[in-house]
Amino acid sequence: MIALVTGATSGIGKCTAEEFAKHNYNLIITGRRNDRLQEFKKELEEKYKVKVYTACFDIRKLSEVESAISNLPGEFKAIDVLVNNAGLAAGLAPIQDGNVDHWERMIDTNIKGLLFVTKCVSKLMIERKKGHIINVGSIAGKEAYANGNVYCGTKHAVDALNKGMRIDLLPHNIKVSAVNPGMVETEFSIVRFDGDESRAKKVYEGFEPLRPEDIAETIFWISNRPAHVNINDVIIMPAAQANSTTVKRNA
Ligand code: NDP
Ligand code: 8X3
């Protein structure tokens, strides 16, 4: 079995790749930071004795996505599971003060990047009449929160695309599912706040956030249901987080 995980250099994607490796899947790991990909490949191959192919590309660039997928070695073209995980938030500001570069980065990555990868990989799945696409959405794709405007918009788009893909790929025997997490402590907030680690740390202070492993286990569980079962959509939150903005923090 082969799983392709986008954004496997950090956080949820990295843990998801490891979860599949633990269960003996061969892996295609992707991201823009090649040093991390090479190091992770070595670690997975040594620890789990699986085959790992690295594909370093920017999901925002259609030509890079097309060439990465068409250049996959033959044995890695038989992708059973695609995890559309790569994504980011950039900034947190009221709409009128929004930074247009931030908006473009989020729209290009979270929506267009996910679409580019899906278009290329679904064609391979259609040829084999089997496959499973698991989209990483967010609680931000279910509700909007103050200053989250464009990030929430991109994740609402993922929610709609998840439903649309499921319909279009149904005749081809391809399952489509989504996982929508609440707050998970990864590099997400460091990226959102442009490298400001102390601001990022505050996001997760005073309560126990989800760990990337929690999401990885859920993704693997979704991928591993019996053939006649599909998990359409999962919302997974820290026990201390009721919705996007209601968090029970210690005083
Ligand atoms: P991280 O910042 O830890 O990981 C993000 C991953 O996405 C990295 O591997 C990064 O790799 C990759 N990525 C980002 N942009 C690109 C790009 N243009 N091309 C290729 N890869 C890219 O964050 P998380 O693990 O938290 O985020 C993973 C997903 O989970 C995202 O879609 C996020 O929106 C979603 N999510 C996160 C939540 C959280 O609270 N953390 C909650 C809900 C959803 P590289 O930089 O090497 O390219
Ligand atoms: C990330 C969840 O609420 O921190 O998708 O933006 S949130």
Image (tube, rainbow, N blue to C red):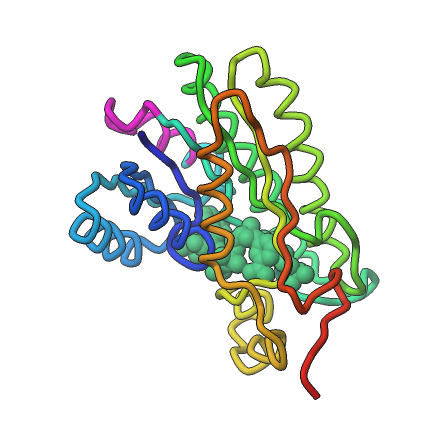
Q: What's the magenta bit mostly, secondary-structure-wise?
A: helix
Q: Give above or below for 149 relative to 203.
A: above
Magenta residues, start to end: 65-78
The quadrant of the picture occupied by the C terminus is bottom right
Q: Is residue 67 left or right of residue 181?
A: left
Q: Residue at x 21, y 48 (%)?
A: 48
Q: Is residue 94 left or right of residue 154?
A: right
- Residue nearest the viewer, comparing 211 with 100: 211
Q: Is residue 172 left or right of residue 19?
A: right
Is residue 73 rendered magenta in the image?
A: yes
| Image spot of residue 54 (x, y percent) | 28, 43
Q: Give above or below for 248 relative to 238.
A: below
Q: Residue at x 49, y 43 (%)?
A: 219
Instruction: Say if residue 206 shows up in the picture.
Output: yes
Q: Give above or below for 239 relative to 12.
A: below
Farthest residue to the bottom: give it.
251
| Quarter-of-image position of residue 244 | bottom right
Quarter of the displayed picture in which ligand 2 can be seen = bottom right
- Residue nearest the viewer, comparing 107 with 183: 183
The quadrant of the picture occupied by the N terminus is top left
| Quarter-of-image position of residue 234 | top right
Q: How many numbered discs, if any? A: 0
Q: Residue at x 30, y 37 (%)?
A: 25
| Image spot of residue 138 (x, y percent) | 64, 51
- Residue nearest the viewer, comparing 225 with 18: 225
